[in-house]
Image (cartoon, rainbow, N blue to C red):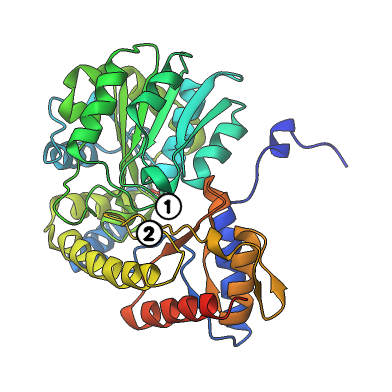
Amino acid sequence: MPKLATRMGRAKPSAIMVIAEKAKRLKAEGRDIVSFSIGVPNFLPGEHVYAAAREALEKDSGQYGSNRGADALLDAFLKHIEALGLTGYGRENISTGVGAKQILYNLAEAMLDEGDEIVFPAPYWTSYLDIAEIVGAKINILPCPPEQHYKLMPAQLEEALKRKPRVFLFNNPSNPTGMVYTRDEIAALADVLVKYPDTWIITDDIYNTMVFDGVGYHNFVQLRPELRDRTVFTDSLSKTYGMPSWRVGFIAAPAEVAKAVTTLNSNHITSLPEVATAAAIAALSGPQDIPAKMCKEFAAKRDRVYDALVSIPGVVCPRPQGAFYAFPDISVAFGKKHNGVEITDDVTFCAALLEAKGVACVPGSAFGEPRSLRISYSCPDEALDKGMARIVEFFAELS
Ligand code: PLP
């Protein structure tokens, strides 16, 4: 058989998808499974979104769309980000993609030659590592353990930037930890970034509407506008509007970067589908009550999950304040047994939990923190309480 490209030796299927598929398979076999594995928001967009999509379907132009995104979509996004304090951008600063994931891949292709350095904190969203590996970048991961609430410290960032990496990639609110940086924390990191002009800054802010406890959402450009000419803001409809299957993502970036991503689009995808474009415009320009309502609901779910986790002796969980994830340190279980099964690490823990209790979580090592696991808690309250009760029970049965 002919050989595949060398880069495929570095490409792995998403660890999250592997667990989610296993949970699905067990469910199909008739097991009572609670899946906390996949990061879907579990709500649907408003009727106005479907109405716009139906209309677009009926009016099908029979043409390809714009590589950058339809003008009306760019304008709707520009208006949307103004509310986040990102002002002074024009259409030339925006580009679109098939979800934030594809845009992040485009950005890596646009910014990183093989061997160029990318730096990002751990815990990280799994695809950051995979994308960086596929493009052959040199990867510098900055460990941010539970003791520092999984947050990057300015001194850590400064040390990393002294090496003049090509790209710094930052995610806030965080998947997998649910941590949200305060205004002061963002300002302190921004003050460091200002001093190192050789590095592109990519912020993945796709959970920006899901912030609890009045912490508020903040970004580098809002607080230090001088960072605008090397910062890329990444957003998506997937989580905010409950539209993961519509595959619409955005960047607001320096014009040169938006143009590069658009050029890659012209070769990778041509354009977003017309129907998804119409739906996206409707979501961005229509009533914003659904994201606000979901934020409230996720805050209440966070309380249920957090209260259950901190009731377990030895489990440490920095309190999540955004997105819909909790990321407890479960290392107290390592070295113990459950029904004779040895728990040696996060992977054996998650396998035993799924086998014994039918609860699917993603091992922390998939996110660069092997002491923890990720709970995606967007499911209905009944399933949430059932799953958390089983986790509590599992810990109580360890010997
Ligand atoms: N960035 C983060 C932090 C995510 O959690 C996800 C999806 O889970 C993505 C990007 C990709 O989102 P999209 O559905 O827009 O591709």
Q: Percent x, y for residue 180? A: 28, 46
Looking at numbered disc 1 in the image, what kind of residue is underneath it? Pro
Q: Is residue 197 left or right of residue 19?
A: left
- Reading the image, the residue beneath label 1 is 176
- Reading the image, the residue beneath label 2 is 325
Q: Please report the residue visible at 37 percent of the width from the left and 35 percent of the height from the top.
A: 152
Task: Note whether 109 is above or below 32 in the view shown.
Answer: above
For label 1, the SS is loop
Task: Tell me if I can see residue 98 in this picture.
Answer: no
Question: Is there a contact, CB below 8 Å, between mark 1 and mark 2?
Answer: yes
The quarter of the rendered structure image containing the N terminus is top right
Q: Is mark 2 within 8 Å of ligand 1?
A: no
For label 2, the SS is strand
- Image quadrant of residue 83? top left
Looking at numbered disc 2 in the image, what kind of residue is underneath it? Tyr
* Closer to the camera in the image, 199 or 236: 199
Q: Please report the residue visible at 35 percent of the width from the left and 70 percent of the height from the top.
A: 305
Q: Please report the residue visible at 62 percent of the width from the left and 78 percent of the height from the top.
A: 26
Crowding near pointer 2: few (<14 within 10 Å), some, many (20+)?
many
Q: Identify the mark nearer the N-term, 1 or 2.
A: 1
Please state the total of marks drawn on the protein image: 2
The quarter of the rendered structure image containing the C terminus is bottom right
* Closer to the camera in the image, 45 or 53: 45
Q: State the separation of the CA atoms marked 1 and 2.
A: 6 Å
* Closer to the camera in the image, 81 or 165: 165
Task: Tell me if I can see residue 52 in this picture.
Answer: yes
* Closer to the camera in the image, 250 or 125: 125
Task: Note whether 313 is above or below 285 in the view shown.
Answer: below
- Image quadrant of residue 387? bottom left
Q: Percent x, y for residue 366? A: 56, 50
The circle drawn on residue 41 is: none
Q: Is residue 130 left or right of residue 43?
A: right
